[in-house]
Image (cartoon, helix red, strand yellow):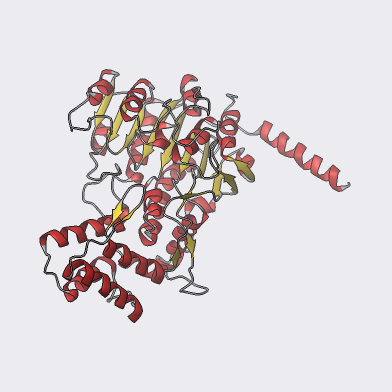
Amino acid sequence: MNFKGLLLGLGAMAVSFSVLAATPKYIFYFIGDGMGMGQAMAGQTYNRVALGNEQPLMMMQFPYGGMIETYSASSTVTDSAAAGTALSTGHKTKNGMLGMDADTVAVTSMAKVLHDAGWGVGLVTTMAPDDATPGAFYAHVPNRNMFYEIGRQAAESGYEFIAGATWRGELDNSGKSRGLHDYIRSKGVDLVTSIEAVDNSKSRRVFLYSESPFTSGDIGYTVDSIPGMLTLPDMTRAAIDHLERVSPDHFFMMVEGGNIDHLGHGNDGGGLAIEVLNFNEAIAQAYNFYLKHPDETVIIVTADHETGGMSVGNRHVGYTSYPQYVPYQAISKDNFSRKVKELLKNQPDMTWDQFKEFTAEKTGLWKQVPIKARQEKKLKEIFDDTFEKRMALADEKTLYSSFNALANEVFNVLNEIQGYGWTTGSHTGNPVPVYAIGDGMEIFGSRMDNTGIAPRLLRLAGLQ
């Protein structure tokens, strides 16, 4: 057989296999917000080197892998709204637009198609449930910041389960209630604030949320170990249990690891590696379900875009990296910066030795994590400018945070020592990975555009 004939034969075999593949009853769609290959490998390297795990991350054990391009209709570098719309509906749109095409015409998400066909639907995120990625699966607005309108559309979706942080449309700019919570309840939704309440609910529709203490509207970072905070693995488990109760025959779940993106914006390499492991634990919840229903379940893991231009390795560490220093980091860059600002306000006479002790406790620097003389010299200069000279050094601002100059330099040092490199505090146009498992999921083992996932999953489910 010549080469052309071989290709045709292989294509025919692939088509034949797809036809014979069983129609799934359960679809899990995981989106690591901002998770490019650098972020995935940061998690994997931390998992292997620092934690000593011989088994790769769960997603990296899946039999099919590919990559997707992420550009939007308006830019080579997408935002989360345009990317979420492409991933959920198969349509490109302009940055900032949600559930609409570039001409502001509403487009239908695969979750809606499945729900209309009788499937239960659950959406889980570490971010606000009215944020771009979850919103792309139910909302149609020209501006992703229309939180009140997005929240009302969530209530009107009919979906059985939504979980995340704060509903940002509940309060107006003055802090007064706009009645969104009441509107959600009026649609037959049990609006709860704990996993226990989900487990005990008798309602078909349950929305779980957590009042976020952060302006960015997330549930909190894994590295900060906030007591009582919701976690992505727990919310994922609760969603699976709920959907098994109310829609045992068919259900669809989208699960977003949104904190990966926020940590990428802040260039917090250690915190991000830990967050990828948290995302991996959520995937493991779905994989445990898959093991019980292997012929009926499919799982796909991907990202909406890459954030930060992250690399494992930088110009300072040569042909290596040092993820073994990450476990000594017990705080996110966001939280560390907040604490430095509190010290400036409440302990303005802090000495350099006191600051070193504080930083060592939170990051491992000067204790378990070695620091070079030039790094310490620069930190001391910024400390003197900040605490002794009381100079108003400019904060570094990113999309979601504003970092004190001293805190920013501490984390520059941590990244350098741990071995993480960055090119930006924003998104990039880099491709992102795809990992898949389940009958028929070999269709994702190639290069594709981000508009290709939703239509393929619907075809696999026999609905397109």
Residue 139 rendering spot, x and y as whole percentages: 41, 26
Nearer to me, 143 or 250: 143
Residue 389 rendering spot, x and y as whole percentages: 18, 69
Nearer to me, 425 or 200: 425
Check the image and report above or below for 448 versus 110.
below
Q: Is residue 240 visible?
A: no
> Which residue is pictured at 36% across the width and 55% down the height?
266
> Which residue is pictured at 42% across the width and 71% down the height?
322
Residue 298 rendering spot, x and y as whole percentages: 53, 38
Nearer to me, 368 or 63: 368
For residue 55, side relative to residue 150 (left or right): right
Number of numbered discs on residues: 0
For residue 204, side relative to residue 52 (left or right): left
Residue most extreme to the bottom: 373
Q: Is residue 441 visible?
A: yes
Q: Could you say which quadrant of the image residue 141 lies in?
A: top left
Residue 448 rendering spot, x and y as whole percentages: 62, 42
For residue 61, side relative to residue 129 (left or right): right
Check the image and report above or below for 278 versus 365.
above
> Which residue is pictured at 24% across the width and 37% down the height?
196
Tell me the quarter of the image containing the C terminus: top right
For residue 87, side relative to residue 8 (left or right): left
